[in-house]
Amino acid sequence: MPPSALDFLEIDALLDDEERMIRDTVRAFVRGRVLPNIAQWFEDHTFPRELSRELGKLGVLGMHLHGYGCPGASSVSYGLACLELEAGDSGIRSFASVQGSLAMFAISNWGSEDQKNAWLPRMVTGESVGCFGLTEPDFGSDPSGIRTAARRDGTDWVIDGTKAWITNGGIADIAIVWAQTDEGIRGFLVPAKTKGFSTHAIERKLSLRASVTSDLIFESCRVPGDAVFPEVLGLRGPLACLNEARYGVLWGAMGAARSCYESALEYAKARKQFGRPIAGFQLTQQKLVKMLLELNKGVLLALHIGRMKDAGRAHASQISFGKLNNVREALAIAREARSVLGANGVTLEYPVIRHMNNLESVFTYEGTNEIHTLILGEAITGSNAFT
């Protein structure tokens, strides 16, 4: 029996029963709730706020964290969920990634017991939404230079500055904000209703349109002394969170790639030119095979890194390896699929152009292609080429 076009290397057989159950549950949710609506959400530039609670009920928010109501799922299970969510849309996976791997992970790893008890149980259900404020208008790839500052004023902290390109910013109930202090960079929990804190939606995006992206603005924003993460100091805190998010991205990108490949394969079998389906032409088969190769290799890479992560062996540079490769190849797959669909490939009747546009953002967020290249360069040469 020939291999399946949709699971050519029988990767399904490498998963255990629980992993398959989680994957299939998220896949069913995406097919039933996301796919019938996502083209309209993308076109309308909207993320339905009720999806937060629905994703919480599904169990994908902070699913790889432990305690405080979090499921404590394996890294592989979390990765499979990210893949299925992004097969729906990068914006949906981004919401879950920011909620779980950035905001919740920061609280889980660096928060006090009071901070964890106050926020994690509400965030895992989607009742409360979080965002992660690190990037600034002039400081993206170099977070060490951030200008947002927090100063002590009696027992309080006063925060001033601006964060940019913050996913979930305009719908968040709590913002994790990283700011310069006299002691170094520290993290703060800033509730959305805090006086002096406001958001500004970033409009006219042609990518990640089914996702809320905002600037965070702090103008003499006063928070109590217990709003600061008690111990973590410097970039160690935010970079650990970014590493978690990058792990989800390297899986998620393969979901977008799979959607594009499946769409191109189905279209090629149905679309006729010169009296027969274009799937029978050599150049079309070459395109489909290129997509098949990189998709299967990318999923195997994600699974391998996931197994390493579950075993406690995955190094940050190996996460960068996965992010660099899988997002790059997912974008190439999307572009190849677009060419198979011809003019139909640029309409929202098919998922390809939506995924392609989204992947242009995924290509640069959570570390640009260049940054991950330099991370790997330093890992194999021992020489830091960032400066």
Image: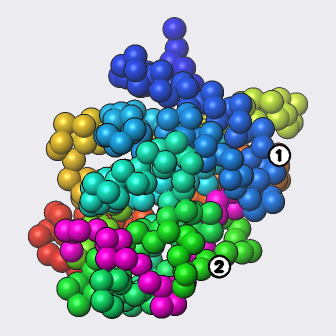
x and y percentages locating residue 69 in the rendered image: 40, 38
Please, what is the three-letter code of the amino acid marked with disc 2?
His
Q: Position of residue 32 (x, y in %)?
A: 71, 31
According to the picture, the residue beneath numbered tag 1 turns out to be 349
Instruction: Decide if residue 325 is in sight here.
Output: no
Q: Is residue 94 left or right of residue 119?
A: right
The answer to whether 342 is drawn above or below residue 170 in the figure is above
Quarter of the image with the C terminus is: bottom left
| Residue in the foreground of this view, choosing between 308 and 191 | 191
Q: Which residues are magenta?
A: 209-233
Q: Is residue 137 above or below residue 119?
A: below
Q: Residue at point 35% right, 71% down? A: 227
Question: In the rendered image, which quarter is residue 155 located in?
Answer: bottom left
The residue that appears at 74% across and 47% down in the rendered structure is: 38
In front here: 19 or 163?
Answer: 163
| 340, 355: nearer the viewer | 355
**231 part of magenta stretch:** yes
Q: Secondary structure at mark 2?
A: strand
Cα gap from disc 2 to disc 1, whole angstroms: 31 Å
Q: Residue furthest top?
A: 1
The reply, left or right, for residue 298 in relation to residue 3 is left
Question: Few, some or many C-alpha atoms within 10 Å of disc 2 (few <14, some 14-19, many ≥20)?
Answer: some
Q: Is residue 155 visible?
A: yes
User: Residue 280: percent from the left, percent from the top?
Assistant: 71, 30
